Amino acid sequence: MDWTLLFTDYTIRNVALGALVLGIVSGALSAFAVLRKQSLLGDAMSHAALPGVVLAFIITGQRAPLPLMIGAVIAGWLGTLAMIAIRTHTRIKEDSAKA
């Protein structure tokens, strides 16, 4: 592989820098989530966000990022509220409420 492409090619440079930043941020957040016993929160929110994206597309009929992101955020927020309600009103442990 030609390593000079990492510094000269715009696309490869952006992908490499994005992967680097994502790896650093994910590592720090993952350690924090495991220590707070919220390791499955990201998994549950990602599964909750998909219906929000689909509903936002059905409602707006657009593939623009902003409406889809708003739908994902709202659905993720509602999913998080549901997990909190399950955890506080039942005897289910925190990690099991997210499964």
Image (tube, rainbow, N blue to C red):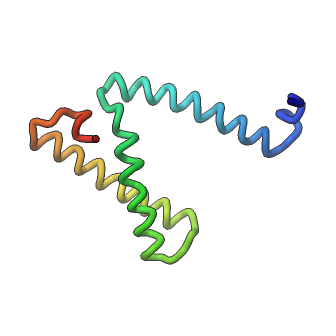
Q: Quadrant of the N terminus?
A: top right
In front of the other: 97 or 88: 97
In-image side of 90 versus 23 (left or right): left
| Furthest residue toward front | 1
The quadrant in which residue 40 appears is top left
Q: What residue is shown at x 86% (from left), y 28% (from top)?
A: 3
Q: What residue is shown at x 54% (from left), y 31% (from top)?
A: 25
Tally the marks.
Answer: 0
Place of residue 13 in the rendered image (x, y in percent of width and height, measured from the top left): 78, 38
Q: Give the answer, above or below, for where 45 lies relative to 61.
A: above
Q: Give the answer, above or below, for where 84 lies relative to 78.
A: above
Q: What residue is shown at x 21% (from left), y 44% (from top)?
A: 84
In-image side of 92 versus 48 (left or right): left
Place of residue 73 in the rendered image (x, y in percent of width and height, measured from the top left): 41, 56
Q: What residue is shown at x 70% (from left), y 35% (from top)?
A: 17
Place of residue 59 in the rendered image (x, y in percent of width and height, measured from the top left): 43, 76
In-image side of 18 versus 48 (left or right): right
Q: Quadrant of the C terminus?
A: top left
Q: Give the answer, above or below, for where 14 lies relative to 24.
A: below
Place of residue 72 in the rendered image (x, y in percent of width and height, measured from the top left): 43, 58
